[in-house]
Image: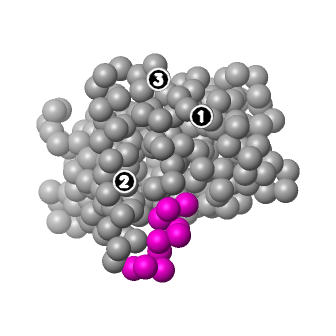
Amino acid sequence: MHLFVNDAFALEPVAVRQVGDIWAQLCEEAVLAAKSDIALTRAMNAAILYHGSFAAALTHRLALKLADHDLDVDELTVAITQVFLSDPAILTAAAADLLAIKERDPSNAEILTPFLYFKGFLALQGQRVGHWLWHHDRLHFARHLQSRISEVLGIDIHPAARMGKGIMLDHGSGLVIGETAVVEDDVSILQNVTLGGTGKESGDRHPKVRHGVLIGAGAKILGNIEIGEGAKIGAGSVVVRSVAPYTSVVGVPARPVGHAAPGSALPGVSMQQTLDEPDYVI
């Protein structure tokens, strides 16, 4: 565990600074929280301040959340530590996810709260651990984590799904992402979204969500289709055909209702949920 002191193992210098900055900010916010409410002192110490690094604190948080009678905190701590040591880029992705939440969620202006409490953030980091396990022939361990994340956090992401960084799973409740799905960088997804199959295919059968997409609450995106860069999917929409880049779709079945110029602000980052057409708000 001494390698976790500064999270510098096998990371590029820029990534080391990013993770280090996140850790410093997290500690500062934990100290302020404890000072503002003495009842939180023990909690802030146990969750953040007693740890030597972002990696160690994240390991502890995930292990504590996902432990059960089959795999206890110590066993999960060993496994998660191994994953972070083997693929420290997971830490960079986690740091990017925290920044994404801080920048995009109007109800939250810090990184401490999502780190400790946001289901979407915690489920995504657990899935990243499961993804590593899945690709290193530890399928049953990965399945166990998927099951625990679903039971504890109400979010079901298959460990084989490929998730980018800078992702915000807002609220997260009821989110389902299938085995062959891809979610690229800077995507924001609201609650009760399904990235699923059509129920009649095998193999590569789930959506590919490209850079900067925004998916509204309750949307169902089904099949091996592509949601192009910068697209918006309206709340409650059912999408069964590919969506062109920078296109907004709504409805059942979804149909295009707006277009933006390529290179426009990415809706997954801006969280701009309105359209130029005044009749539509996703």
Image quarter of the C terminus: bottom left
- Residue 93 on image: x %, y %: 42, 36
Q: Dot 3, how many residues are within 10 Å of its Cα: few (below 14), some (14-19), or many (20+)?
A: some
Residue 216 located left or right of residue 146: left
State the CA–CA distance, disc 2 to disc 1.
Answer: 20 Å
- Residue 140 on image: x %, y %: 81, 35
Would you say the residues marked 2 and 3 are in contact, meaning their CB atoms lie under 8 Å apart?
no
- Residue 268 on image: x %, y %: 30, 47
Up the image or down, 36 lies above or below 259; here it is: below
Disc 2 marks a residue whose amino acid type is Leu
Q: Which mark is residue 26?
A: 2
Residue 75 located left or right of residue 64: right
- Residue 135 on image: x %, y %: 67, 23
Could you say which is closer to the camera, residue 6 or residue 10?
A: 6
* Residue at the disc numbered 3: 9
Could you say which is closer to the camera, residue 23 or residue 265?
A: 23
Disc 3 marks a residue whose amino acid type is Phe
For the point 35% across and 74% down, which residue is it?
A: 35
Which residue sits furthest right? 70
Q: Earlier in the sequence, mark 2 or mark 1?
A: 1
Q: Which mark is residue 1?
A: 1
Q: Earlier in the sequence, mark 1 or mark 3?
A: 1
Q: Which residues are magenta?
A: 37-46
Q: Is residue 42 visible?
A: yes
* Element marked by disc 1: loop
For the point 51% across and 34% down, which residue is it?
A: 4
Up the image or down, 16 lies above or below 145; here it is: above
Would you say the residues marked 2 and 1 are in contact, meaning their CB atoms lie under 8 Å apart?
no
Up the image or down, 88 lies above or below 121; here it is: above
Write down the quadrant of residue 109 in the picture.
bottom left
